Image (cartoon, helix red, strand yellow):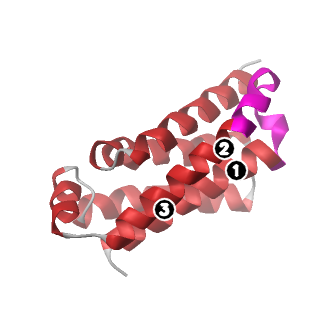
Amino acid sequence: MGDREDLADAVEELGAVLKNVVFDRPHLVLADVLGELREAWERASAAVRSVVTSLRAGGLDLEEKLATAGLLGSSLRAKLRGFKAALARWRAGATTGTLLRVLGWGNVFLGSLASVLPGAEVLKEYKEAVEQSVLDVHEQ
């Protein structure tokens, strides 16, 4: 599997975690914004699909942009290894702490990806809103 495919898989996994939190684990999310996060999921989900499609379609221009953003080779593998480890901890025991680790590792690649693929910015902003909501609940 190539770097772009691995990155596409990570974007899909992050999207699945976000959907799971907002729709299946509402106790982790600030009640005041839960309705809006559920409404906004449609756009975030479309962003996931768009980013994944773009990554899988590829092209030389995309390869160059990903390389410049640190999203190829050992740099990407380090980011994805951390993300996958956090994801495994979340799946083994879904707690606020394990969720925040997944979202934190998602930050590591989403910020760079948003500089390469405009659709990733929508997903990044959605993830940040969910993350802040989880933090707000956690700190109450």
Magenta stretch, main secondary structure, is helix
Q: Earlier in the sequence, mark 1 or mark 3?
A: 3
**Mark 2 is on which residue type?**
Trp
Magenta segment range? 24-39
Q: Residue at x 70, y 50 (%)?
A: 19
Identify which amino acid the numbered label 3 is placed on: Ala
Structural crowding at the residue carrying mark 3, measured as other residues with C-alpha within 10 Å and reported as few (<14), some (14–19) or many (≥20): many
Q: Position of residue 55 (x, y in %)?
A: 36, 65
Pinpoint residue 103: horizontal percent, then vertical percent: 55, 43
- Residue depicted at 33% across the width and 64% down the height: 77
Q: Tell me, for residue 41, which label it has, or none.
A: 2
Residue 10: which numbered mark, if any? 3
User: Between disc 1 and disc 2, whose residue precedes?
Assistant: 1
Nearer-the-camera pick, 65 or 85: 65
Q: Is residue 131 magenta?
A: no
Image coordinates for residue 51, horizontal then vertical, percent: 43, 57
